[in-house]
Structures are given as structure tokens and as C-alpha cells.
Amino acid sequence: MSNKEMVESGNQKIEWARSHMPVIAAVREQFEKEKPLDGHRIAMALHVEAKTAVLVETLAAGGAEVAIAGCNPLSTQDDVALALDTRNCIDCHASYDCSTEDYYEAIDKVLDFGPDITIDDGADLIFKMHTERPEMLATILGGCEETTTGIHRLKSMEREGALNMPVIAVNDAMTKFLFDNRYGTGQSSWDGIMRTTNLLIAGKNVVIGGYGWCGKGAALRAKGLGANVIVTEIDPIRALEARMDGNEVMPMKEAAKIGDIFLTTTGNRDILSGEHFEVIKDGAILANSGHFNVEINLEDLKKMAGSVRTARKNIKEYDLGDRKVYVLAEGRLVNLAAGDGHPAEVMDMSFANQALCVRYIAENTLVNGVHSVPRELDISVAEMKLKSMGISLDKLSPEQTLYMDSWSCGT
Ligand code: NAI
């Protein structure tokens, strides 16, 4: 494709996403009128694809200058990156399948741009500033973090007294994790697995590593596709929840012997490692939807394999002698590295939260540390989403309010 065709294709994808994101459209309308981000410079490290482009445009519409890098070497869509780069006030430094050096060089470039607000998905910008460019922290008003793993990283920095800027934990907004992590990851992981393998899910033993918000969604959708779902967990409450939701629960060592398709969603490392590959079934398909590519231990798999070859685009076959095992998208998040990521309607809410939190940072002085998304912003996103869906709610009557607030109305 020529550059011109790439830009056209990127613009088509962005337009399609934009037309399915009514909440962020409403935020953009406010931003265009009020220009709350005038004079601000925003550095972003996010998956550079169409929905993210809609967020970038919204921030620019609010008056900001924006520079964006990727947050994963395999999740950038080059046509979208090129299309974004043609816009005023937006610099895009991301490309698909870049080397580790190019990945971190791009992170440096968006920091060179001199931001006063950051948006991360995985905390790479914040981590880089704290470890290599601490002088930048003096002019940073605050940052937003998109994902569970990024928030884990930031909370551990905070616990150790090492977090020297305010960050809003956007992932922890109810209108983010309840929908994006559950229904977004639930649907898009299976989309990535199905379009990559072109295989049937019905009748298979599907093993979901972790029954958090992403795992619950992934298990629910696997069941809907006709799979027999097995969950592995370390948390007794989540394991119990998985069982009562109708899944089997067992240790990975047991599940490895019977699973046909494995999907890890824990945010932890070595969910599938050497001890599991020792017993794993011939033909097993391994995919990950957790943020980093550490959930499937590919080093262990490489050591055990006689040979590795590409079996099909985005599928590596590891030949273990008596068995073959297939890894999708190099163990990187399969919904983005082998698909288009979450549905636009879900990112509509996640990115409306991001845009409103960036505005909040621009208009308020926050102390260093991890902050929750202000409750009123979270509720406003839910209200805007319901309105866009044509759904209205009941309202409490004065008698109901009184009843709910009272401790004396027992009969
Ligand atoms: P969560 O904290 O709600 O759930 C993680 C679950 O994994 C917990 O129930 C935990 O007990 C379990 N777990 C941890 N170690 C385990 C082990 N060794 N074996 C079995 N279970 C284990 O986190 P959430 O929100 O579900 O996110 C999970 C990961 O997915 C994170 O890395 C997050 O950043 C990422 N994520 C990816 C998205 C995508 O587009 N692919 C979207 C949203 C989040």
C-alpha cells in the first residue's frame, strides 16, 4: 500500500470507530466549546489503533498538543498511526512489530516533547521518567493509567515512596473495568483467537488462567461459544465464584493435561511454564490477554522445543518431539496483537473516562500518589452511555429516599 492508501485506510478505521463512540463524541463537543486543554502538552503510550485515535483527536479538540507512542510492539496499526500523524497538533511515533530499541526510543520521543500530562497503558512513560528522566517530574501535573497491570506497578511504587507525581487510576473506574476488562477483553480475545486460528471453539476444553475481570469475560464468552470452560486461580473467593458460575476449577498442572485452548488473563508471570509444557496435550493452542508477554513462559518452551516454525500468520508451532504446541501472537495480548482490540462501544466509556480525567488534572492540583477517578465523572460516563443507548431509569420518590435513609422503618 502507498502512504496515501495507508492514510485513507487509517482514516476509514478511525471514522468507523468514531461513529460508534457517542460518549466520547459528547465529551469532544464540550471540549471544542470550552477548550479546557489549551496550552497543555499530553504524552501518551497506548495501543495505537482506531479507538485510541478517537481519544487523541478529542484531546486535540480540547486544545492540547499530543504526542503518542505505542504501549506494545505488536499492537500498533500502521495505517492508523500514519493517519494520526497527518493531523494538526498530533505527533505519532509508533510502528507495528518494532524492535525493543525502537519501542523505547519512541517512548523517549514523546517525553522529549515536554508533556505536562501523561496517559499510559502499562505505566511505561511514568516508569521511564522516574528511572531515567526524573528532572521531567517537576513540570508534570499528573498522569492517567489505563490498565490493571499499570496500576499494580504504580501502587507498588507508591508503597515504596517512589511515586513522585499524581496519577489517576482510570482502570479502576466502574465504567472502565466492569465493561472494558470484562466484555471488551471477553469478546475481543475470542475474536483474536478465532480469526488467527480459524478453528472451532465449540466442544473444546478452554482453560482460562485467572478469574478477574478479564477472565470472567473470557470464560463467559467461551461458554457462549460452546466450550467446556476450566478456570485456574490462586484466590479462593474468585475460584469459588468461577465454580458457581458453572466452570470447572483446578490447578494448571491438571488443566494442562486436558486443555485444547489456553487463555491467560492474570497480569502475572509463568501461568504456563515448563512444568505445564511437560504434560500439555498435543495440538494445544496458547494465547495471552494479560498486559505483558510474561504469562506464557516462551523461554521454557523454546528450551524444550526441537524446532519452532510459523504454522500460519501469528501462530508459532513449537515441536516438543512427541507433541506440538501452538502459540498465538508471540504470547502478547492476543486481542490487540492478532485482532483489532476491544469493540468501539466499550472503549467509548474507557476513553471518555481518560479524556475527563485529563481535564480534571488540568483543572485541579493533585498531590503525588495514585488517585481514584472522581465518582461524579464515573457516574457521568454511565449516564451519557445510557442516554446514547436510549435507556432511561426510575428515580427515587421522596418516600423511597426517606425509607432508604432511615434506620427506624423496620415494619
Ligand atoms: P484482575 O486483578 O481483576 O484479575 C487477575 C486475576 O488473576 C485475579 O483473580 C488473580 O487472583 C488471578 N491470578 C493471579 N496470579 C495467578 C496465577 N498464578 N494463577 C491463576 N490466577 C492468578 O485483573 P484484570 O483486570 O482481569 O486484568 C488482568 C490482566 O489483563 C492485566 O495484565 C491487565 O492489565 C490486562 N488487561 C488486558 C486487556 C486487553 O485488552 N487484553 C484489557 C484490560 C486489562
Image: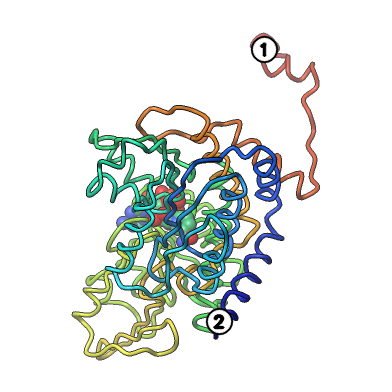
Q: Nearer the viewer, residue 313 or 303?
A: 313
In the foreground, 399 or 54: 54
Q: Is residue 259 above or below residue 293?
A: below
Q: Quadrant of residue 221?
A: bottom right
Q: Quadrant of the N terminus?
A: bottom right
Q: Position of residue 92 (x, y in %)?
A: 46, 63
Seen in the image, is 200 located left or right of residue 112? Answer: right
Does the numbered disc 1 mark a residue whose Cβ is under 8 Å from ligand 1?
Answer: no
Residue located at (25% from left, 47% from top): 133
Check the image and report above or below for 107 versus 146: below
Q: Give 239 or 348, whichever is nearer the viewer.
A: 348
Q: Which residue is mark 1?
A: 406
Where is 171 relative to 321, above or below?
above
Q: Secondary structure at mark 1?
A: loop
Q: What scheme was used to colour the molecule? A: rainbow
Which one is earlier in the sequence, the residue at label 1 or at label 2? 2
Taking depth in this image into account, of 195 and 41 the one nearest to the observer is 41
Residue at point 30%, 62% (across, down): 104
Q: Is mark 2 within 8 Å of ligand 1?
A: no
Structural distance between the alpha carbons of marks 1 and 2: 55 Å
- Left or right of 101? Residue 25 is right
> For residue 200, which numbered disc appears in the image?
2
Amino acid on which the number 2 mark rests in the picture: Leu
